[in-house]
Structure formats: structure tokens, C-alpha cells
Image (cartoon, helix red, strand yellow):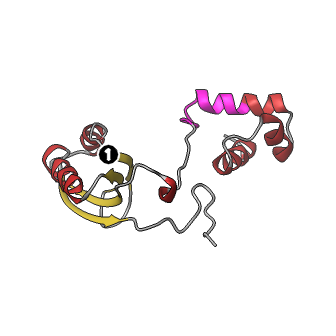
Amino acid sequence: MDRLDREILGILREDARISYRDLGVRVGLSANASADRVRRMRRDGVIRGFTVLVDPAADTRGGLVVFIDLTLRQDTTNEEFERRVAHLPGITEVVHVTGEYDYLVRARAADPTALDALLRRLKREAGVAQSSTRIALRAATRPGSGSVRP
């Protein structure tokens, strides 16, 4: 990866739907050269996919959006945990982090009872020793923009 690839990634993080023509204008390449770079980064696994970020307030499914800090049991490896947690319903993101906890998990639960069931499954099936859960009240930034809501 070079400077242009990093610049392209930064632009795609802001707007993954940008046309190759507009992307090329922003980085000083032709549309074809921009497309080639994006295709290469996809092929090489640098870009793993594209997604839609939905404002939690606009999501009509309802329920709770939660952030769960997790510490693994001493006998659970990161690989085991990641494999096991991938199959649990409601989990939308799993991030390996530094600090007091091992992982930060973002999940959705229909209600407190469903959240309790998810936490129990994490401990029973995924090798979690300890958890600390926070419930999202509202999003203070616009999804994908990083800018604070007015």
C-alpha cells in the first residue's frame, strides 16, 4: 500500500458509494486507475467489503443497542472466542481492544430479558469470564461522518 491507496481508503471510509470518476478526481487519477486500485485492495483483502451505516434512531426494529466489554477466561484463546461468538444472535460487531478488557462487543437485544440471555450465553458458550454492559441511549454523531449532531 502506498500513499494513494491510503488516501483512497480514507475517501471510501467517508463515502463508499463515490464514483470511480469522482474518486479519481480527488486523488489525481483516472477513473480506470482508481477502479483498478480499489479492485486490487479488495482482491488483496485490504478492503473486506462495503456496508451501510444505519442511524440507530432511524432503525425500526426497536430493542436495545448495547456495548459489552468482555474479559476472557484464562483457558479461552482469542481464536476460540472469535469463532464461538460469531454464531451468537444479535452480535453486530466484535473488536479486540487494549486496556482493561479483551473485547468490545456491539449487540442488539429485543429487551432486557434477551440481553440477559445473550450475556449468559457469552459466559457459558464463548469463554467469557467477566462483562460490563452499557445501553446506547442515542447516537451523538452521524453514522459514518464522525460529525456531531446539531
Task: Judge left or right: residue 139 versus residue 39.
Answer: left
Q: Residue at x 23, y 61 (%)?
A: 131
Q: Quadrant of the C terminus?
A: bottom right
Q: Residue at x 27, y 42 (%)?
A: 85
Q: Is residue 36 above or below residue 50?
A: above
Task: Judge left or right: residue 66 versus residue 40.
Answer: left
Q: Amino acid at mark 1?
A: Gly
Where is residue 36, by image quadrant?
A: top right
Camera-side residue: 141 or 74?
A: 141
Where is residue 70, by image quadrant?
A: bottom left
Residue 26: x and y in percent read 83, 47
Q: Which residues are magenta?
A: 37-49
Q: Is residue 67 above or below residue 4?
A: below
Residue 22: x and y in percent read 82, 41
User: Per the image, is 2 magenta?
Assistant: no
The residue pinned by badge 1 equals: 90
Where is residue 37, by image quadrant?
A: top right
Residue 45: x and y in percent read 55, 32
Camera-side residue: 31 or 28?
A: 31
The residue sitting at the bottom extreme is 150
Q: Residue at x 16, y 43 (%)?
A: 125
Q: Residue at x 66, y 40 (%)?
A: 1
